[in-house]
Amino acid sequence: MSVAEATPEQTATMEQAYLEYRRACTYILHRHAQERQLLDQLASPKTADEIIAAMGFLPERKPTLALFLRALASLGSVVAEPGEPMRYMRNPDLAATAFVFDQDLIAQAIGVEKVENLIHGQSYAGIIDTLYIHENPIAADFSSSNTDLWNEFLQMPFYRFSRERAVQVLAGPGRRLLDLASGPGFGLIELAEAVGGAGLVIGGEISRGFIAESVERVKAFPYVRVMQLDLEDGLPFFRDAFFDGAMIVGAFHFLKQRQQLFDDVSRVLKPGGRFCVAYTYMRLGSPDQDLMDLRFHLRQPPSVPPTVEELLGYATRSGLTVADRSTMGCFGTFLFEKPA
């Protein structure tokens, strides 16, 4: 497959499509809240503790409930009344048109065949289930038991768009490239096809299940290597100034040793080399922020969204400069360069 350069207009359109998709996801939360009579309880203002008592939610799920209600407030189906403690109430003025979605836009984000199931299916039902039970049925870690789920998500058009943009700004014939947290190998294939037989692609991944998937997926490319790699331990075994480029897509927000990663990548890049940090969950205050804060609150491993200032600070301290940046809701993509 070839990865074509995206125009600013295409990037803006994909972000718009992605945000419409997330708005539809938030509506699904509204629908589940309605089906479970949670919205009936909010006919009059209630605190989170009063809601827990009325609905039989677990008291320890109070932080999850607060994020759930914030997401509904961002849709407009719930109103948060200021004060201490905060009270929540069903929005009595909510118009039916609030739940009209542009299905063509949603189709651009997730694919035409998935739209109807999204709107009418049981997606996100597990979120409200967690309010009642001690287990977390939607943690979806990176073990082999979740392979099918991740393979589907990583090929969603909006996610693939971010990954392919990273490939496009890094790859070229004969280049040496590093794919960090390379997952089940979709990015490895795209990088391999771009660099050709004269190049080299190395994927580093912590999940043995994903490594097994990757090895099978890239077996037609002898110049691709996949290794088990915990990014929290750094990159001590790679030579200085060896790679032309490196990317990490959809995984930076899971890391704890963030400055170390930037320092290590800067060290292994050649002068003029590029580092793309793509599809990174961030604190941007976009319309999808409350929904994604809720989703990542329940995901394993835990994730902490950096701010733009924090991300740029890591780069500055490692000697990298920012060359480009874009957003897709609360997900940011940043391209950094090592001075020549």
Image (tube, grey):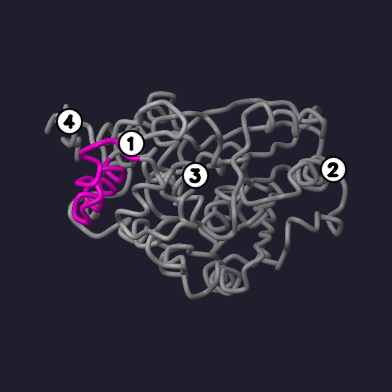
Secondary structure beneath dot 1 equals: strand
Q: Is residue 109 above or below residue 222?
A: above
Q: CA distance from mark 1 to mark 3?
A: 41 Å
Where residue 277 appears, x then y in whole percent? 62, 40
Give yes or no for contact between labels 1 and 3 (Cβ–Cβ under 8 Å). no
In the rendered image, which residue does mark 1 sit on? Answer: 88
Q: Earlier in the sequence, mark 2 or mark 4?
A: 4
Label placed on residue 164 = 3
Where residue 27 appears, x then y in whole percent? 25, 43
Of marks 2 and 4, the one in the foreground: 4
Q: CA distance from mark 4 to mark 3?
A: 44 Å
Identify the magenta region.
24-46
Q: Is residue 71 visible?
A: yes
Of marks 1 and 3, the one in the foreground: 1
In the rendered image, which residue does mark 4 sit on? Answer: 92
Q: CA distance from mark 2 to mark 1?
A: 51 Å
In the rendered image, which residue does mark 2 sit on? Answer: 267
For the point 80% across and 40% down, which residue is it? 266
Q: Main SS of the magenta segment?
A: helix
Mark 3: give few (<14), some (14-19) or many (20+) Cα within 10 Å. Answer: many
Where residue 28 appears, x then y in whole percent? 26, 49
Q: Earlier in the sequence, mark 1 or mark 3?
A: 1
Q: Earlier in the sequence, mark 2 or mark 3?
A: 3
Amino acid carrying label 1: it is Tyr
